[in-house]
Image: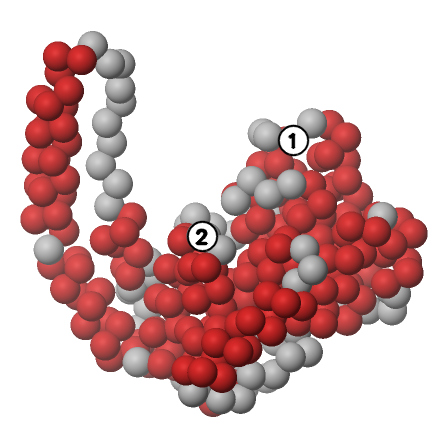
């Protein structure tokens, strides 16, 4: 999952078409068309059209190869809270499952976390999971939070720190609990960037400075594995994945001061 990727509606449809049948793709397409109409006059704080946020959320879910109900809910997750569309409208047009997920995500968004005490953080995580009658509610919420973290630079520094702290204490552990490591890692990385940018870029520098050493280590490990199984007549393809080591380095060229500066609206 690349944080550099900006999804288009067409890209999301292409992604789901690679693993869904035509009827399921049609559900996702219909959800996008409905969301684009409902959000047509809205803008995000960055100034971009609001529909870009649901598109990115749906794209994150499509990248995880979620089912059509979940991806469609990604397009529709803000529609009850931020437009004149009602939950009954969603239920009538898209069925009870999508309506349930949209309603669940809306309710989760209204729960405010105010403490950084470990016990209260755990209680808050349990509350969020308990309110998610279907685990897909939590997955859509995590995708929503992930895209919001990717665009956090458009908020004031105090909001950046508050949201980053909440993300680090609540949402990253929930992603870990659900086994969605790609989301967990990125939530942690971006949170650190706003909570402690100096430490974040120190780690980035260390990771970049040792890239050649890591690549050599991975190549050596691949060679050892090939030698160990060479007599087993197994047809395998070997690749060395550095993603665990390099996840801190995405968009590192951006100056730290630009990431934490205040934005005037």
Label 1 secondary element: loop
- Colour convention of the picture: secondary structure
Image-based side of 133 in relation to 248, left or right? right
Q: Is residue 151 above or below residue 244?
A: below
Question: Answer yes or no: do the residues labelled 2 and 1 have beta carbons within 8 Å?
Answer: no
Quadrant the C terminus occupies? bottom right
Q: Residues within 10 Å of mark 2 (few under 14, many from 20)?
A: few
Task: Name the residue tied to disc 2.
Answer: 179
Residue occupying the point 27% across, 22% down: 237
Residue 262: in sight, yes or no?
Answer: no
Q: Quadrant of residue 119?
A: bottom left
Give the CA distance from mark 2 to mark 1.
Answer: 23 Å
Looking at the rendered structure, which numbered label has been put on residue 20?
1
Residue 255: in sight, yes or no?
Answer: yes
Image-based side of 22 in relation to 161, left or right? right
- The picture places residue 243, in percent across and down from the top left corner, at 29, 48
Residue occupying the point 80% across, 56% down: 99
Q: Is residue 55 above or below residue 144?
A: above
- The picture places residue 97, in percent across and down from the top left corner, at 78, 50
Image-based side of 228 in relation to 179, left or right? left
Image-based side of 168 in relation to 84, left or right? left
Q: Residues within 10 Å of mark 1 (few under 14, many from 20)?
A: some
- The picture places residue 228, in percent across and down from the top left corner, at 10, 23
Q: Of circles 2 and 1, which is in front?
A: 2
Residue occupying the point 77% across, 71% down: 81
């Amino acid at each position: 999952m690349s944080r550099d990727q900006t999804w288009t509606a067409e890209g999301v449809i292409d992604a789901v078409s690679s693993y869904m049948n035509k009827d399921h793709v049609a559900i996702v397409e219909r959800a996008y068309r409905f969301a684009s109409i409902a959000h047509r006059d809205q803008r995000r704080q960055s100034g971009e059209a609001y529909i870009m946020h649901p598109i990115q959320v749906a794209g994150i879910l499509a990248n995880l190869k979620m089912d059509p109900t979940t991806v469609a809910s990604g397009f529709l997750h803000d529609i009850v809270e931020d437009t004149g569309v009602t939950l009954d409208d969603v239920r009538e047009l898209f069925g009870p499952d999508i309506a349930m997920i949209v309603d669940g995500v809306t309710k989760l968004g209204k729960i405010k976390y105010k403490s950084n005490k470990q016990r209260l953080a755990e209680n808050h995580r349990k509350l969020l999971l308990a309110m998610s009658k279907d685990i897909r509610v939590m997955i859509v919420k995590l995708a929503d939070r992930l895209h919001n973290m990717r665009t956090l630079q458009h908020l004031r520094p105090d909001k950046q720190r508050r949201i980053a702290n909440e993300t680090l204490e609540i949402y990253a552990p929930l992603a870990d609990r659900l086994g969605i490591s790609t989301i967990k890692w990125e939530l942690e990385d971006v949170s650190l960037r706003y909570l402690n940018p100096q430490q974040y870029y120190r780690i980035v520098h260390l990771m970049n400075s040792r890239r050649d050493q890591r690549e050599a280590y991975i190549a050596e490990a691949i060679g050892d594995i090939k030698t160990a199984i060479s007599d087993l007549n197994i047809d395998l393809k070997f690749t060395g994945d550095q993603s665990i080591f390099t996840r801190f380095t995405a968009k590192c060229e951006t100056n730290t001061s630009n990431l934490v500066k205040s934005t005037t609206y």
